[in-house]
């Protein structure tokens, strides 16, 4: 290969390297968002204590759970709801807080609680309003919590399920 060929190859490699640097500077959020979403999406296990009355007119229920992502990171999810009768069983409205090793998200929560004996199917929408310290989710994003509550018919019981970030 002649010196002239090496010069062209060197310029081509340099151009590709420069393009990669520009892309990594221009689009860092894409890789951070993917990492953040991986922390939000996962399995959920915890408890769902409830109390008749309290700050709510019918039932006050909390869902306190650990979220384990496919990447192995753990997060804490707290959903605090007022529950009332609906055409499908029960509905809930309240707030949530999700804390991961890389950041936190808070917002409003709403959804259905459909009883079947001593279990109930949960289908909640978690609307992200605010985030702090790191990319977990962005305001306006929607998280879905789907699971099962195994009521002890006294004051709560365990919950299991999944949470998914739908962006």
Image: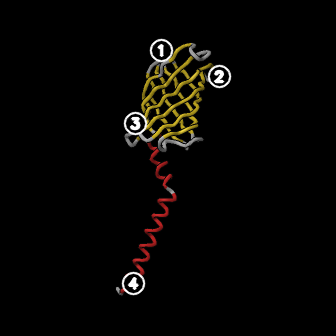
Q: Earlier in the sequence, mark 1 or mark 4?
A: 4
Locate residue 41, reporting x and y percent.
47, 40
Compare marks 3 and 2 and give the one earlier in the sequence.
Answer: 3
Compared with 26, 48 (above or below) is above
Q: Disc 1 or disc 4, which is closer to the eye?
A: 4
Whole-angstrom CA distance, mark 3 to mark 2, is 35 Å
Q: Secondary structure at mark 4?
A: helix
Q: Give the residue at mark 1.
A: 155
User: Which residue lies under the disc numbered 2?
Assistant: 87
Q: Which comes before the other along the chain, label 3 or label 1?
A: 3
The local secondary structure at tag 3 comes to strand
Mark 1, residues whose alpha carbon is within 10 Å: few (<14), some, or many (≥20)? few
Res. 125 image quadrant: top right
The residue at the point 60 percent across, 24 percent down is 91
Residue denoted by label 3: 74
Q: Position of residue 71 (x, y in %)?
A: 39, 43
Q: Which residue does the numbered mark 4 point to in the structure image?
A: 5
Mark 1 lies on a secondary structure that is loop
């Amino acid at each position: 290969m002649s010196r002239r060929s090496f010069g062209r190859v060197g310029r081509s490699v340099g151009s590709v390297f420069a393009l990669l640097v520009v892309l990594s500077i221009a689009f860092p959020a894409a890789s951070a968002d993917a990492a953040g979403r991986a922390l939000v999406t996962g399995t959920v296990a915890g408890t769902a204590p409830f109390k008749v009355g309290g700050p709510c007119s019918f039932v006050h229920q909390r869902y306190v759970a650990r979220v384990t992502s496919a990447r192995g990171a753990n997060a804490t999810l707290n959903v605090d709801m007022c529950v009332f009768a609906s055409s499908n069983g029960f509905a809930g409205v309240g707030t949530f807080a999700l804390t991961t090793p890389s950041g936190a998200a808070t917002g409003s929560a709403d959804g259905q609680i459909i009883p079947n004996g001593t279990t109930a199917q949960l289908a909640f929408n978690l609307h992200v309003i605010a985030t702090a310290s790191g990319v977990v989710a962005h305001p306006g994003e929607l998280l879905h919590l789907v699971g099962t509550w195994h009521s002890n018919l006294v004051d709560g019981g365990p919950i299991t399920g999944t949470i998914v970030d739908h962006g």
